[in-house]
């Protein structure tokens, strides 16, 4: 994963009218994707002071990475809280825990 300040990176920048913001968005994704490839990790994330975004590298049946095959989760805000008795609320801490469980059991 990687850590960024929320003022310097946001998933909304993917469709920004400003070229610099689009470039920064893809540069960060490229950086963590490269880290994931080097470590043979399928899951990775970018965390900021306001939200967490999880990613999964897509691979074919032979385990070879599919070029450009990245799946992105919606932003999970750090201030999201789970409500007892109300399932379906994903908090950032729970998402990170689950992502690490997936990574540790990945073949």
Image: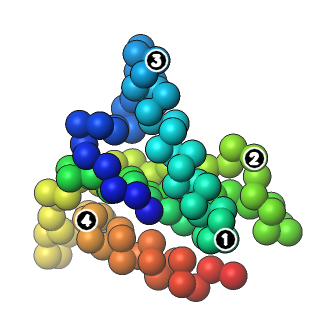
Q: Which mark is residue 92?
A: none
Figure coloring = rainbow
In terms of depth relative to the viewer, which is nearer, 90 or 58? Answer: 58
Q: Can residue 78 be seen here? A: yes
Question: Residue 91, which numbered label?
Answer: 4
Q: Residue at x 45, y 52 (%)?
A: 73
Q: How far apart in space, not on screen, are marks 2 and 4 (Cα)?
A: 30 Å
Using residue 61 as the reference point, say whether residue 24 is left or right of it: left
Asked whether, in this view, residue 29 is left or right of residue 8, the answer is: right
- Neighbourhood count class around disc 2 (C-alpha, 10 Å): few under 14, some 14–19, many 20 upward: few
Q: Which residue is mark 2?
A: 67
Determine which residue is flagged by label 1: 40
Whichever of labels 4 and 3 marks the residue nearer the N terminus, that label is 3
Cα separation between marks 1 and 3: 31 Å
Residue 93 vs residue 61: left or right?
left
Q: How many marks?
A: 4
- Observer-nearest of 91 and 89: 91
Label 1 vs 3, first from the N-terminus:
3
Q: Give the Cα separation between the discs numbered 1 and 4.
A: 26 Å
Within 10 angstroms of label 4, few (less than 14), some, or many (20 or more) residues?
some
The single residue placed furthest to the top in the displayed view is 17
Instruction: Please tell me which of labels 1 and 4 falls first in the chain.
Output: 1
The reply, left or right, for residue 28 in relation to residue 41 is left
Q: Residue at x 39, y 38 (%)?
A: 11
Task: Choose the circle earlier in sequence order: 3 or 2.
Answer: 3
């Amino acid at each position: 994963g990687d850590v960024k300040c929320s003022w310097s990176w946001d998933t909304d920048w993917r469709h920004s009218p400003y070229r610099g913001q689009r470039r920064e968005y893809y540069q960060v994704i490229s950086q963590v994707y490269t880290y994931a490839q080097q470590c043979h990790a399928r899951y990775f994330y970018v965390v900021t002071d306001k939200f967490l975004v999880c990613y999964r590298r897509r691979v074919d049946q032979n385990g070879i990475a599919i070029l450009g095959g990245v799946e992105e989760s919606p932003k999970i805000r750090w201030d999201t809280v789970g409500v007892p008795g109300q399932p379906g609320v994903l908090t950032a801490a729970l998402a990170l825990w689950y992502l690490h469980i997936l990574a540790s059991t990945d073949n």
